[in-house]
Structures are given as C-alpha cells and as structure tokens.
Image (spheres, grey):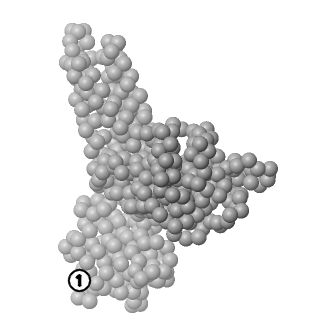
Amino acid sequence: MIFNMSDKDTITAISTPPGTGAIAVIRLSGESALEICEAVFVSPADKELTGQDPNTLHYGTIRDEDEIIDEVVVGLFKAPHSYTGENLVEISCHGSVYIQKRILELLVSKGARLARPGEFTMRAFMNGKLDLTQVEAVADLIASGSKAAHRVAMSQMRGGFTEEIKKLRDKLLTFISLLELELDFSEEDVEFADRSQLKVLLEEITRLLQKLKNSFSLGNVIKNGVPVAIAGKTNSGKSTLLNLLLREEKAIVSEIEGTTRDAIEDLISIQGIHFRLIDTAGIRHTEDAVEKLGIARTLEKIRQAVVVIHLLDARLPAEELILQIEHLEGYSGQDEKKRIIVLNKIDLIPDDSLDMISREIENHLTKKDYLVSMSAKKGIHLDRLEKALIEAAGMDTTSENDVIITNVRHYEALDRSLSAVRRAVDGLDHGIAGDLLAQDIRETIHYLSEITGEITDNEILGNIFKNFCIGK
C-alpha cells in the first residue's frame, strides 16, 4: 500500500462495523469536510455548519435535494483539534445498510473520495497527532480481546513507550553533538565528550533496551493469548480439567484409554488474561497408528507452549509420578517454559497420603515449577490452579505503568539499537576514534527514531496501515 504524503483530498468512510445496526457513523476528514457535509445536511433552524463552534453536535436531516434520506446527528471537530488534525465531521445515522450507502454516495458526489484502510489514522500521524507507536496501538486497541491486551494498548496510546524511547534518544543526542564537535576540532586533539560519563550512560541505555526487548515475550502472549498445553498420561483427567476450565463439556470424558486422539484447543479468560488451552492426547505406548499420530502432535504442542499443565493421578505411588515428571521434561524444550504439576483426583485419597506425595514431588521440582493439588471432577481447588496460571504467565508482576512491547517491528528496532549500543561500549573500552564511536551512537539513534516514526518511509507505513480497517 502506497500513501501519498501530500494528499489533501477530503476523505470519507463508514467507521462502524459492516452490516445493519442501531447506529452507524460516517466520517469526513479534510479541508472541505464541513462544506461537503453542509451540502447535504439541513438543520431545523437552517444553521450553517461552517459557522458553528467546534466540538458540538447538531441534529438535522441528510437530503438528496428534496428527498430526506435520514435523521442524523452531526459532530463537528475543527483543525487542528481533531483526531486527524484536520476538519473532521462524524455523521451518526440509523444503521440501515441502505442509508449508510446513500449517505456515502451523496458525500462522494459532493467532492469527497472514499478513504483507504487506515487513512484517517495515517493523517493523524502525518499531522503530528500520533507517532507510529501510538498508531500501532490504535490497531492493537481495536483488536484487544482481553483486559490485559486493552491495558497494554492504552498505555501505548497514551505515549508510555514513546516517552521511554524519547528519553533514551535525547540523552544520546547530547553526547553525539559533543562527539561531532570533537570532529570539527580533530587537529587540536581535544575531547568535549567525557568518556567515563558516556560509558555510564551507554550502560544505562543497554539495561533499559534489554528490559524493553525482554518484555516482548510477555507482550506477545498478552496480545495473542498464553498457549497452555494440558499434558499427562491417559486417564489422568486432562479432558475433565479442560471442561472444568471452560465451564462446558468441550472434550469427551471416558474411562477408556486413548479417547483423546488429537489436540483440542479453546480460549478462556482469567482475570482479564487470555489463555489458549490445548488438551492433548494421553502419552503412553500404543500400536494404534491414529493414536501414535495424536501423541506426536501432543509432544509438538508441549514444545510450543509457554506453560505446561502436567496432570498426575494422585492415587499412583510417588515414585511412579516422579518418573512421569522426568519423562515429560525431555519433551518440554526451552528452559524458560513454566510447568504446573497438578496432583489430580485428590478426592479419592486420604489427606495424609496427599501430604506425603506432595512433599516427595516438591523435592524434584525447580523454582520455575508450581505444584497444585485438586480434583478436576469435583472442581476442588480450581482457584489455586487459576492463580498458578496467572503467576506462571508472568502476569502477576506487571503494573499499570509497565512498558511492554507487543510489536515485532519495535522488537527488531530495539534489537538493532542494542547491538549498536554494545558496539559503542566495546569501542569505548578499546579507545576507538571519536568518528567511529559517533557512527555507532548515530545508528542507535536511527533505530530508536524508526520506532516512533521520526525516521520512516512509505514501505514501513504501508506495512503498518495495510491491516487497518476502512474508516479508521
């Protein structure tokens, strides 16, 4: 998608979802937005829209000459105090598809053109109302399906990430200007930039960039949902647990071994966090070709998951349960994966036996593991499992003010910035020339500026806006 940076057309689009509803909103943005709307709008008192105060609502009708199309409410927003930074009109009409289509056709006939996907937000960016991180947060906000995703998007919309980047960039600009000044006086062999202060600053920036980069793994699961594999031997209660978490009979529960032969996936929300639950085939030795395929898929899902719930039948001897834990460890992959070991069917054993088994299992767990005792069939201690899921996903340690990266473009730019900063630190340690040091710092500033859009090009903008909905 190519955007014309100098495009001054007045654009229009339906901003509400397609289809019939109670209300629809049609937007106009551009220098002639008010005049074009006024050409089809009639108020009861024959007021002219162009003479009305900004940020006001006006009742009237939309007409095609003498034909009344609909009764509407028109909202006026005048440049530069609007979403796009241009004159902006929002027409709230009845949600009939026919009415929406007729109003849109009328506006086009009076001089507007249909907006491209994301063009209203594009104009907000071009007019300095939003930077690129805020633009991308608009798309994330529209797509947010959970409280956590909404919170992260709102934080970026308010400029939380931008502020972090701006602080880093401003500090680097101070030193780069001193290094550039040294180059102007290179024949006199003087230093304006204190190398020890610069190293302290670069090390501080390295830590901040690494922290931002590390937040991407958490941001990714917030945005897309935390993948959780429910694993264990056949008849350990995996399908029963899935049904309990979903509050519906999603999976077939049977005493017959090997009932679940393929992964069953569904989405739940716990305390505003989305979890993608995957009920997997029971792990056991089998000669059944279909079940073997299901077990192979199980092991792949376990490797892909961020959190693994390993279900154990609490009625079995502790030695056998420990062997099952050790057996599954070989398939988990990635050291940072969190495991929740669930001792299931505790309603079928005495409390003293449960205490003994729990102590023995705890001796074989690591700091990244959680142990929960419960009964999936009776719902006993479900709250403990849900609490462990929140903690295992890392959601319990985040706050409203945390800056969390959810965008691949930001992650890649941070990675490049980090590499450039580390080269600069290494260069300081080895006493490299000021011009080479300046080059590494300039690269860092360049990649940080790419994040906020202070440096950009049409290709980057096209990639950002191509998935925006029309009308936004």
In this picture, is 466 found above or below 321?
A: below
| Front in this rendered view, residue 68 or 238 | 238
In this picture, is 350 found above or below 52?
A: above
Element at label 1: loop
Q: Quadrant of residue 140?
A: bottom left
Quarter placement of the C terminus: bottom left
For the point 24% across and 62% down, the residue is 81
Q: Quadrant of residue 367?
A: top left
Residue 284 in sight in this render:
yes
Residue 7 in sight in this render:
no
Position of 455 with respect to 178 (left or right) is right
Position of 293 with respect to 409 (left or right) is right
Residue 84: give x, y in percent of width and height. Answer: 32, 60
In this picture, is 202 found above or below 392?
A: above
Residue 58: give x, y in percent of width and height. Answer: 26, 80
Position of 263 with respect to 413 (left or right) is right
For the point 64% across and 51% down, the residue is 233
Disc 1 marks which residue? 47
Residue 358: give x, y in percent of width and height. Answer: 48, 48
Query: Callout 1, which amino acid?
Result: Lys
Position of 293 with respect to 10 (left or right) is right
Residue 326: give x, y in percent of width and height. Answer: 59, 39
